[in-house]
């Protein structure tokens, strides 16, 4: 220990002490990293400082000056290692897409020691134009990375915290991403004529309210034809490198058993018979309960983008008003409300974690409901 502390004489002839501690090698440059301190008047002063730095090195808390010159991308890569262990693969994959597609293009090459509020503001303004619906999420991710840098004492403050978030003019647009009862009946009629497989898929969405990923994950073992129920216990998820896998669902409330109407279950029986014939021709075990209800021709998970293509094809063929695939879930909720089903029962059927989600997303009622509300009020006042 004392051997690391050296005595030396300054040009003016004064006696001073210095020390040198070996830390390791810079991962980027391969250069040796050392702590060099000098100018101590006494050996005890030098020893006190030496022990302080030595303890930081042993605990892994010492940050070399070279590491303080990290770019934002390098800091992001450090943060990413810790972040990876806290989220699901699908969330991790989405985060990578946000960073590679937007964030790193704006901030990646800037040294974190030189990163200013102006840099951050310019980036935010760009993101607002490129992705107005998700730019706030980009800000949140950058804050996480820079806060991590502050915690590691690589930077003293987070400049992203001071940006002004752009706002779009608040215009109330009518919510139309759902079908009325009549529109749904027309869509399903045309879908049945166009392609029976597509028809079954959208019939399930509209009559159960399940999510697209939940429907694509269904296996025949999830169907109980005796009790007319469907078990929702998994969902198709897209992970790293677009890998498809089955996850346990969005929340614990997503795992549920749905009572189904008799006609939908009869359609499912018809589809099972048709599918078994197809799978027999393709050489698969057509009797296996582990088969997907909507597999690919290779008997694998269907890409989540496929239902959008099916929906587009049907609407284009028959000139129908287009709603998103998720709109069939909206449709189910809207028609449940129209039928007089309670908010709590709708929540449970849709698999929401809390009643607020149901109220926030699915209180968009149909025109018919609004008219009935007005008529009910007028009738009440007259009586």
Image (cartoon, helix red, strand yellow):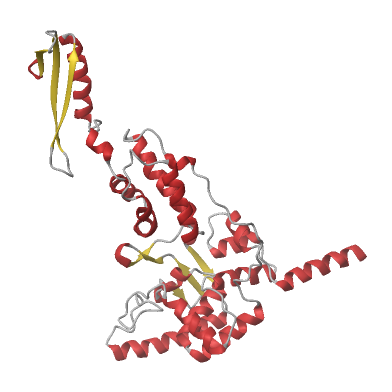
Number of marks in the image? Answer: 0
Image check: 261 left or right of 56? right
Image check: 301 left or right of 211? left
The quadrant the N terminus occupies is top left
Q: Which residue extends farthest right? A: 382
Task: Please name whichever residue, 331 or 30, is drawn nearer the observer in this view of the structure.
Answer: 30
Q: Quick check: 1 above or below 44? A: below
From the top left corner, tell me how far across and down residue 324 is, in percent: 53, 73
From the top left corner, tell me how far across and down residue 226 is, in percent: 49, 77
Image check: 378 left or right of 133? right
**Residue 243 visible in this rendered orientation of the protein:** no
Q: Quadrant of residue 29?
A: top left
The quadrant the C terminus occupies is bottom right
Task: Please name whichever residue, 202 or 48, is drawn nearer the observer in this view of the structure.
Answer: 48
Q: Quick check: 42 above or below 270? A: above
From the top left corner, tell me how far across and down residue 108 is, in percent: 33, 50
Residue shown at the point (56%, 65%) measured from the top left: 349
């Amino acid at each position: 220990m004392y051997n690391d502390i050296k005595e030396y004489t300054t040009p003016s002839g004064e006696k001073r002490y210095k020390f040198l501690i070996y830390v390791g090698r810079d991962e980027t440059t391969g250069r040796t990293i050392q702590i060099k301190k000098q100018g101590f008047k006494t050996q005890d002063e030098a020893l006190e400082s030496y022990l302080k730095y030595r303890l930081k090195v042993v605990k892994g808390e010492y940050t070399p000056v070279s590491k303080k010159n990290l770019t934002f991308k390098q800091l992001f890569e450090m943060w990413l290692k810790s972040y990876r262990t806290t989220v699901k693969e699908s969330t991790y994959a989405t985060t990578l897409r946000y960073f590679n597609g937007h964030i790193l293009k704006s901030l990646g090459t800037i040294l974190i020691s030189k990163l200013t509020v102006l840099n951050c503001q310019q980036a935010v303004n760009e993101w607002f134009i490129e992705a107005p619906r998700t730019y706030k999420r980009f800000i949140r991710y950058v804050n996480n990375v820079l806060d991590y840098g502050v915690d590691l004492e690589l930077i003293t403050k987070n400049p992203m915290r001071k940006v002004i978030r752009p706002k779009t003019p608040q215009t109330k647009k009518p919510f139309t991403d759902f079908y009325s009862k009549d529109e749904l009946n027309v869509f399903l009629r045309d879908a049945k004529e166009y392609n029976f497989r597509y028809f079954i898929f959208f019939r399930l969405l509209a009559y159960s309210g399940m999510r697209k990923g939940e429907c694509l994950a269904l296996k025949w073992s999830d169907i109980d034809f005796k009790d007319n129920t469907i078990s929702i216990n998994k969902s198709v998820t897209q992970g790293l490198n677009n890998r498809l896998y089955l996850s346990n669902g969005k929340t614990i409330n997503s795992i549920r058993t749905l009572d189904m109407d008799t006609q939908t279950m009869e359609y499912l029986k018809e589809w099972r018979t048709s599918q078994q014939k197809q799978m027999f021709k393709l050489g698969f075990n057509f009797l296996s309960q582990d088969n997907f209800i909507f597999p690919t021709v290779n008997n694998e998970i269907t890409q989540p983008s496929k239902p959008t293509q099916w929906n587009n094809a049907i609407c284009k063929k028959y000139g129908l008003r287009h709603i998103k695939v998720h709109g069939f879930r909206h449709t189910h909720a809207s028609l449940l409300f129209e039928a007089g089903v309670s908010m709590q029962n709708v929540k449970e059927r849709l698999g929401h974690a809390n009643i607020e989600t149901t109220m926030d997303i699915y209180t968009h009622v149909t025109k018919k409901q609004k008219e009935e509300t007005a008529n009910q009020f007028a009738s009440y006042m007259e009586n």
